[in-house]
Image (cartoon, coloured by chain):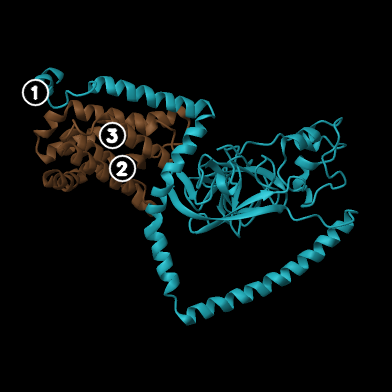
Chain colours: A brown, B cyan
Amino acid sequence: MADRENLLIVLLTAIVGLVLSILPLPSWLTVVRPAFLVLVVLYWSTMTPYVAGLTLGFLCGLALDVFQGSLLGEHALALSLVTYLAVRLNLIMRAKPLFEQSLYVFAALLIYELLLWVIDGWTGRSLSSPLRWVHTAVGALLWPIVAGVLGRFHAAR
Amino acid sequence: MAGFGTTVSRPIYGRGPSPGLRFTVCALLSLTLMYMDQRQRWSERIRFGLEAAAYPVQVAVNSPQAAWHWLTDSFATRTNLRLSNLQLQHKVNDLEIAQLRLQSLEQENAQLRELHAALPPLAKHWLIAEIIGVEAVPLRQRLIINKGAHDGVHVNQPVVDGRGVLGQVVHVGPWSAEVILITDPEHALPVQISRNELRTIAVGSGSADELLLPYLAVNSDVKSGDLLVSSGLGGVFPAGYPVGRVIGVRRETNQLLAQVRAEPLGRVASSREVMLIDFDPKHPAAPPTASTLAAALNPEAPPPPPPKTKSVRGKGAHAETAPAETPAVTTTVPTEVDP
């Protein structure tokens, strides 16, 4: 089945995204490192919402929680919300050129980070630094590249 | 948007429950997890299982770095090896001499304290662990190490390197564990200045080369170059272990507290291996357990197990092992080191 192949590709790219998200890097690079996994989940949930939907978002968020040692469920909730929006708005977003898609992605990443920020604040996890917002802009700028790379897999099917 | 989407997208994602329902389920699940993780401790068991699943990925992610280290190690030239061998031999000689001096000092100390024999070593058990993951985001200073519950690692176990305190274990998985470094902003460590035994708390700053001492009064006796050692309060670290060195003191006359910065002595950023310690709880310099604390705080109760020893590492070990007749010193309730 094409769906099954698709699911395999989705899972593989999600694992690559996860690895890129948690790969140890020098500290200045971690500041500008985009949330690769979120970008991958966003791509698949807009392009193939019938294969990769909320379950993928939730599980990827949970994986982020485990690997980053954050409050369990924090990233899961944020990523579920973003995935939900992506699935809801997938037709609108797919019709836009890449540049405008970047703006949507920027908004999605901002919502994602805002939710994390709020939860961090409520639970008294750690102080906030303005640097945590940098990755949203970087992620939006990188979206055309991510979409291009993932689109190649998508089309190659 | 939904009205636009329904007719077109029905056949596409018509299978299974609707996205709205799915989102509600996911959100409720996340909220429950968060509540459990924040309020109740038994989510540790879920975390334990998840960390077991995460271990292979952590190893895989670390493998390029490990491979690089392996490569550089195996292609080290003969001259380099001989050089480092020579250096190590010198170091061994130095340490042996220092050890001899230490032994005689220990004996002398025991005699002065009218003990019949020197005390057994403080550390009961050492475990060397390799770092397999680093999180050095500005506001999170954590390590993942490759030893876990199967090797006897437990939560709140102190982590040190050859130079000083590094941190303590916060989460334990079966084969891996997460360590919070003393430079993490969520970590506070009771310390004391070794020059004058002034007690205070060192809080992580979020950057790997700085600790903050935010609770020292403007007129307190602290200056650059002072050595900070752990004070043994707080029940995690033993007394007298080196922590850091003061690198800057700023006093402003209109403020009640001085702004003191220190650099950690343990190589927080560059260690490849760390040591996990189990302390002998009977040793006077060991961190206090609940029972010894209760004994020390309550003069009627029988004194803690080694009754003759007053303290080994100077007055630093007062609070936890002070004999029952001096309860005045023991009123300091240990500060939390809880991350």
Judging depth in this view, the residue of B259 and B155 nearest the camera is: B155
Say which amino acid is labelled 2. Answer: Val
Question: In which quadrant of the rendered image does the N terminus of chain B lie?
Answer: top left
Residue A134 image label: 2
Q: What is the crowding at mark 2: few (fewer than 14 residues within 10 Å), some, or many (at least 20)?
A: few
Q: Residue at x 61, y 45 (%)?
A: B157
Residue identified by numbered label 1: B8
Residue identified by numbered label 3: A56
- Asked if the residue at tag 2 contacts the one at tag 1, i.e. Cβ–Cβ closer than 8 Å, the answer is no
- Asked if the residue at tag 3 contacts the one at tag 2, i.e. Cβ–Cβ closer than 8 Å, the answer is no
Q: Nearer the viewer, mark 2 or mark 3?
A: 3
Answer yes or no: are tags 1 and 2 on the same subunit.
no
Mark 3 and mark 1: Cα distance apart in space: 23 Å
Q: Residue at x 15, y 19 (%)?
A: B2
Percent position of residue A79, x then y: 31, 32
Q: Is B74 displayed left or right of B204 in the figure?
A: left
Q: Element at badge 2?
A: helix
Q: Is residue A147 visible?
A: yes
Q: What is the crowding at mark 3: few (fewer than 14 residues within 10 Å), some, or many (at least 20)?
A: many
Q: Chain of mark 1?
A: B
Q: Is residue B219 visible?
A: no
Examine the image and state in which quarter residue B91 appears. Answer: bottom right
